[in-house]
Image (cartoon, rainbow, N blue to C red):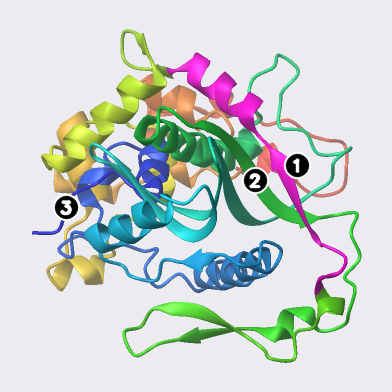
Amino acid sequence: MKPRYLTKSRFKLALECPTKLYYDGKSEYANQKIEDTFLLSLAEGGFQVGELAKCYFPGGYEIETLDYDEALRQTNELLKQDHVIIYEAAVRFENLFIRADILIKNKKKIELIEVKAKSYHTSKDGFYNKNGSIAAAWQPYLYDVAFQKHVVRSAFPNQSVSAYLMMADKKAKCPTDGLNQKFKVVTNDNGRKGVVVSKALTTNDLKEEILIQVNVDECCDIIYQAGFETDDDVISFSDYVNQLADCYMKDIKIISPPSNTCGGCEYSATEQERKDGLKSGFIECWKECLGWMDEDFLVPTVFEIWNFRNKNVYIQAGCIKMADIYEEDIVPKSDNKPGLSASERR
């Protein structure tokens, strides 16, 4: 039986909504992200950036196997060396498992590098809000790295672990034309995507790095110190991660209260998908949390109000159906310009 580890992708899923862990990987539930062409194109860009990053750290060993145990065995064998670079390194601690994009060991120090297909400007882009908390736009990336660092330093407590994001440098100029064409995304016989690097790639292509490596240890510390808010308490990062891992391992559904994120839930099934026998995780959740019946899902809801930023306030107050909301709640205002204002269009 395949181990049920909390991986970095599942941790990211749980940050969106912990209930999604229960639906993940279950073929009986509809999943709108599986065939999302936009997400697939983003993934292809990520493959190319990841392969370019490896070129900036030459001489490494790639862990190609998808088997958990074999990947761990190969990684741990390589880590017996004092100095080593590993691509797609496998690290496990208890029920937590990651594949690090790039892991560099230098005696008692480990550098963990997460490569992202995102651009960054050293003087214009900041990770923090004015109050010192992590900016919302950067949270998915930084919580991802914080999770990986937590796993690595837990697995290797005697090592000093530093974490980095590696992204496209907005200030850098590509040294040669057509560099991206030298990293071709391909699909193997098993349907797994990868990148083939052209033999035409030269040292001139790599002499000026267009990716920037940014240390995020301080961001990780802030995330660890903040912990996670539960219904009636704040628990540590480590405890929350362990709770998620335990529930996923035991296949326990974590019940989450409805929120504005439900409107974009990928585990919603279309009418046709339900006729074809697929389950809707979204409908299951709302039936469990709100006691709704099938007919309740036929009426308009707050999700259908265009550009309405207070959705979550009304959802938490139990005002979910359109019939529960009055015109004065939306507060339509004229902007004194020709045509209807944004609030009037609602």
Coordinates of residue 248 in the picture (x, y in percent): 20, 41
Residue under numbered circle 3: 3
Closer to the camera: disc 3 or disc 1?
A: 3
Q: Earlier in the sequence, mark 3 or mark 2?
A: 3
Specify whether 298 is left or right of 264: left
Q: Earlier in the sequence, mark 2 or mark 1?
A: 2
Residue under numbered circle 1: 341
* Highlighted magenta segment, given as a residue range: 206-227
Give SS at disc 1.
Answer: loop
- 96 to 77, vertically: above or below: above
- Gap between marks 3 and 2, in whole Å? 28 Å
Specify whether 255 is left or right of 146: left
Tell me the quarter of the image containing the N terminus: bottom left
Specify whether 178 is left or right of 194: right
CA neighbours of label 3 inside 10 A, class few (<14), some (14 to 19), many (20+): few
Three-letter code for the amino acid on which mark 2 is drawn:
Leu
Residue shown at 31%/46% (left/top)? 299
Quick one: 145 or 333, which is closer to the camera?
145
Three-letter code for the amino acid on which mark 1 is drawn:
Ser
Quick one: 127 or 273, which is closer to the camera?
127
Residue under numbered circle 2: 165
Coordinates of residue 46 in the picture (x, y in percent): 59, 65
